[in-house]
Amino acid sequence: MGEDSKGTYDVGLNTVVGGSSFVTCVVVGIISTALRSRGFRIERSAFIRDVCFFCAAIGSLGLILVYGKINFWGALVFCSLYAVYVAFMYLSWRFGGEGGEFDIESVHKRGSLSETILQREDLDDGVVDEEHCSNVPDDDYWKLVVWVTLPIYLPRKLTIPVVSETKWSKPTAVGSVTFAPVLLSLLWNWKRSPTSVEAGVVYLTGCSVGIVLGLTALATTKTPMKWLLPWLAGGFIMSMTWSYISAQELVALLTSLGYIFGVSPSIFGLTVLAWGNSIGDLITNMTMALNDGDEGAQVAVSGCYAGPIFNTLFALGISLVGCAWEVYPLRIVIKTDPRLLESLGFLVVGLVWSFLVLFSNRMRLGGVMGVGLLVIYLASLSIRIVQTVGDSY
């Protein structure tokens, strides 16, 4: 989204919309179909909250696309809608009694989902017990893998703090808080001339903040549990930063492949990249829904709407804020794509279908809802592919 080229712009927006459609239609549809005979109910207030906020997010994005322009303050308001969603969700849980029937003790007693992979006894610092791994490649192979991945692994290791008592390393932690601001300053200046005054100020600020944070961590932190929230916040921010870097490179690669093979970059974003981003949601939410009863189904369905809300308002919003800041006080121009608005329309149709079917079925997940969502997604994708193929002739 932050790129100037039309192809990258198409990939970015279509990835967000395509991923949202896949999660809210395909993932929710598969979960509903798989649980059709179990009679699981979804909490009414949570579902209404998520659908209404997602519709507001889609409507806001649609207005931006129709108007075709947005300034820095408009982008900031759009991004801030996610903070409103989080605040409303917390207040509804804290004072409105939402989720009152959720018994966390029952979840811990269920076993499989409450035990994370990192807690398994047969794993220790990434070393698997020999009985679980009979065919281990030779040392030369792993040495080659380490050397090949080192240019990517080492910068991530030195910028993302690991908040774990078993894997805690104070030198690594100090290095991560020292180099993280430097990496952020490099990303902030990537479009600027390295010899400009603005770039110099940003580099100096990043290095100064890194040195201060490093010395503070060196002097005050012995274990991550003492200052857990700052470490978690730093790890989250830097993980998002590396996700942004990876996404930028992947989008550029897909755009290049589109031009090489004569395929519209928007189709790559709507399908390949959107599916790749959403496959984790499919596996995670399906596992939760199938193995953890009513609570698991509730968390899985809520996650299918909370994730796209995050991607639409926060992830896309941050990109808009960054682009608008670069041209401030001018506005950034966003080319109106009727087919993207069409995809947003199908996304709203899927939400309305889920709303109507769930309410008519007393908030029970069922096959009618699941099959309908899958049909809506296939119809949207088929129409978009036919339109793209027609443009090539």
Image (tube, helix red, strand yellow):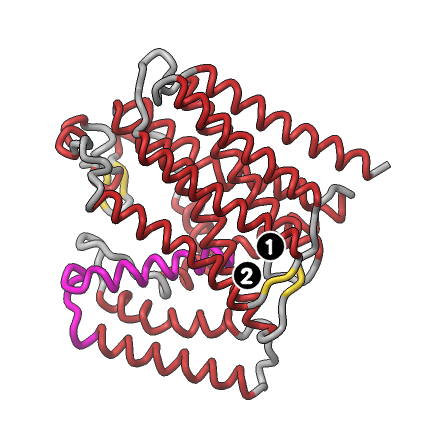
Name of the residue lying farthest toward the top:
37
Q: Amino acid at mark 1?
A: Ile
The residue at which mark 2 appears reads as 320
Q: Position of residue 34 (x, y in %)?
A: 40, 17
Above or below residue 291? Residue 234 is below
How crowded pointer 2 is (Cα within 10 Å; few <14, some 14-19, many 20+) is rated as: many
Residue 76: say if magenta: no
**Which image quarter: residue 383?**
top right
Any magenta on residue 228? yes
For the point 17% across and 69% down, which residue is it?
221
Is the Cβ of the residue at disc 2 closer than 8 Å to that at disc 1?
A: yes
Q: Nearer the viewer, residue 155 or 201?
A: 201
**Which residues make up the magenta segment?**
218-246
Q: Residue 63, image x and y in percent?
A: 59, 51
Return the residue at label 1: 64
Count neighbours of disc 1 (C-alpha within 10 A) and say few if under 14, some if 14 to 19, many if 20 or more. Answer: some
